[in-house]
Amino acid sequence: MSISVEPLDILVFGAHADDAEIGMAGTIAKHTASGMRVGLCDLTQAELSSNGTVELRLQEADAAARVLGVAMRINLGLPDRGLFGTPEQIAAVTEVIRTYAPRMVFAPHWEDRHPDHVACSKLVQEAVFNAKLRRYMPDKPAVSLPELYFYYINDWTTPDVLVDVTDHYALKQEALGCYRSQFIKAEGENATPTPLNQGYIERVQARDALLGQARLIPYAEGFTVKTPYLVHLFGASRS
């Protein structure tokens, strides 16, 4: 899809295309529907995935982005299983944050069974900190520290924030359905069974339903924060 460099309201990072959709596609769809500018940044091309090809996965990512109505999606082409937090990788993520100057940044939760998700979380935290340092990469203007939220992919804890995504859950399912190479069990000698094609989408839906149950709504997506969640007026956001 085309790339716009206008400032974003929300910038979502994932190690691989489909990470953001697993964790927060409903939230993305809800915010784009409200008129907010949301962008996605995939750190790697998932070239080590057991199923699919780089070219196919890029096509699937583009299709999912269109379903969700995002303003932009880019891929940094960092090495799959090679997110070691090098100065060059931190600089690459920092440059994206400075280029799009988002008000909010989202990253995978720092606890997850996939090491790349953990590494992505650490990279984004480093980059968010560096983005405000005016003497770091002085060729690009520093940006004020945006709000940083963490979304769940494989594992989850008690969330600090819930977003009601009931009205947009069909779009989440449609976006996940774009990744047929990952979530649909293919036939043939080159097809490999993985946790993703063994009822994974159904388990994501069950998780989102369970999160929603905490507030008696059909579906919710959960997020955590590392800094206290600021409330300007108690009761203002309660239904």
Image (spheres, helix red, strand yellow):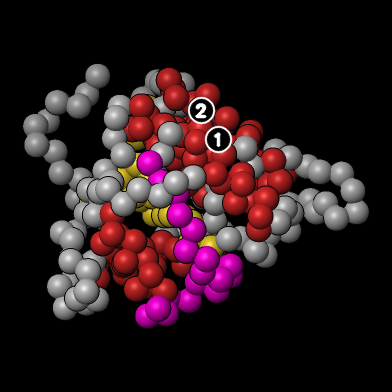
Q: Looking at the image, do the residues carrying marks 2 and 1 touch, with CB atoms under 8 Å apart?
A: yes
For the point 40% across and 78% down, the residue is: 88
Residue 26: in sight, yes or no? yes
Q: CA distance from mark 2 to mark 1?
A: 6 Å
In percent of width and height, residue 104 lies at 26, 48
Question: Which image quarter holds the C terminus?
Answer: top left
Q: SS class of the residue under badge 2? A: helix
Highlighted range, magenta: 71-88
The image quarter in which residue 189 lies: bottom right
- Amino acid beneath label 2: Leu
- Of residues 213 and 205, which is closer to you in this image? 205
- Amino acid beneath label 1: Ala
Image: 194 above or below 206: below
Q: Residue furthest right?
A: 189
For the point 22% across and 24% down, the residue is: 238
Residue to which mark 2 is pinned:
171
Q: Residues within 10 Å of mark 2 (few under 14, many from 20)?
A: many
In percent of width and height, residue 87 lies at 37, 80
Q: SS class of the residue under badge 1? A: helix
Relative horizontal placement of residue 14, taking residue 235 as reference (left or right): right
For the point 61% across and 46% down, the residue is: 59
Residue 13: which numbered mark, if any? none
In percent of width and height, residue 160 lies at 31, 43
- Is 78 within the magenta? yes
Residue 175: which numbered mark, if any? 1
